[in-house]
Amino acid sequence: MERKAFAGLIVVVVAIIAIAMLAGCVEEKPKSTAEIKEMVLATAENTDTYQFEMDMTQKTLISNETDETEMTMTSTGRGAMDRTNKKMKLEMTMTIQPPEKAEIAETKEMTMDIYFINNTLYTKMDMGIPTMPSQWTKNTMPEEYWESQNQIDQQMELLNISKVELLGDEKVSDVDCYVLKLTPDLEKYWEIVMKQEGLSELMQSLKQNVSFDMGKLIKEMSIKQWIAKDTKCPVKTEVQIKMAMSSADLDLETDEEFTMTIDQRTNMFFYDYNKPVTIELPEEAESAVELPMFPPGNQTATTTA
């Protein structure tokens, strides 16, 4: 009897293990787009630190009746964010390939280091020009400036203003991800874009001299986000934009009409969520030259590509 009881127990245990294994192999019930979006937004609220990388390629073509000029700019960068201590760092390299017909047709490379610590923005730019040595500068920024620095917050803004479609799933660096297609409200999208450093001031300056509707200038737009299935954190964002404009669109009075097209593709990668990061100001930046604070209304900067 004891042997039979023991044998019976083994059968029961094996059966339980088999059932558990089979249950583990059953695919998770597919989540709806709305559920995924809600979980991603909720997870972002609990993100304290993360690191990111980016790459961007932009091709600009200007043409008129007799000539065409093309220029290519690429940029790569990596950075880290500490939301708890309000610290950020970013290192970028930008390469400009001028038109072949340019007087100086050699490729130009620039590097930039950016730190945001104690409500102060520290910047060093190396233009690659011997007569213009790089120098650290600093700006004391208002409290609200920090909000525009958070890349994840910007990704969540983009998610919030968009119609979202679940395209399927893919792996990014061995991470199982949901792939989302975003179709943003263009007016709200440009509000986010205008938070980029310098763009707000540039666009305001342009609008004083020319008239244009940014929404009408966008001819094609594709935005995708890859969301980790396990953590519900963004892993990758891809943005492709094609813009086209003419002298007529800009309401410019010129001797010769022209058209300009801009093709831009940007990828951002996010990783090491809520892991310790070290963001310390370089020693040479301690003696940075103080620059005047931006005028009120022009303090909308960010490090997004």
Image (cartoon, helix red, strand yellow):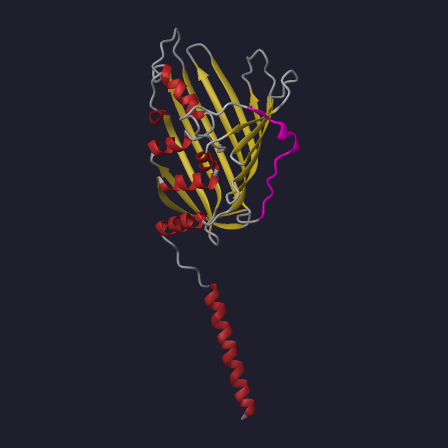
Q: Is residue 24 above or below residue 245?
A: below
193 vs 135, left or right, is left
Question: Seen from this angle, which residue lies furthest bottom?
Answer: 1
Question: Range of the magenta residues?
Answer: 276-290
Q: Position of residue 43 (x, y in %)?
A: 44, 50
Q: Residue at x 49, y 75 (%)?
A: 16
Q: Position of residue 11 (x, y in %)?
A: 51, 81
Q: Nearer the viewer, residue 90 or 97?
A: 90
288 vs 188, left or right, is right
Question: Seen from this angle, which residue lies furthest top?
Answer: 255
Residue 126: image quadrant is top right
Q: Nearer the viewer, residue 30 or 157?
A: 157
Numbered circles on residues, count: 0
Q: Nearer the viewer, residue 90 or 295?
A: 295
Q: Is residue 30 above or below residue 123?
A: below
Q: Is residue 106 above or below residue 90?
A: above
Q: Residue at x 38, y 8 (%)?
A: 254
Q: Residue at x 34, y 14 (%)?
A: 251
Q: Does 10 lie within the magenta span?
A: no
Q: Residue at x 44, y 42 (%)?
A: 225
Q: Position of residue 234 (x, y in %)?
A: 47, 45
Q: Position of residue 206 (x, y in %)?
A: 40, 18
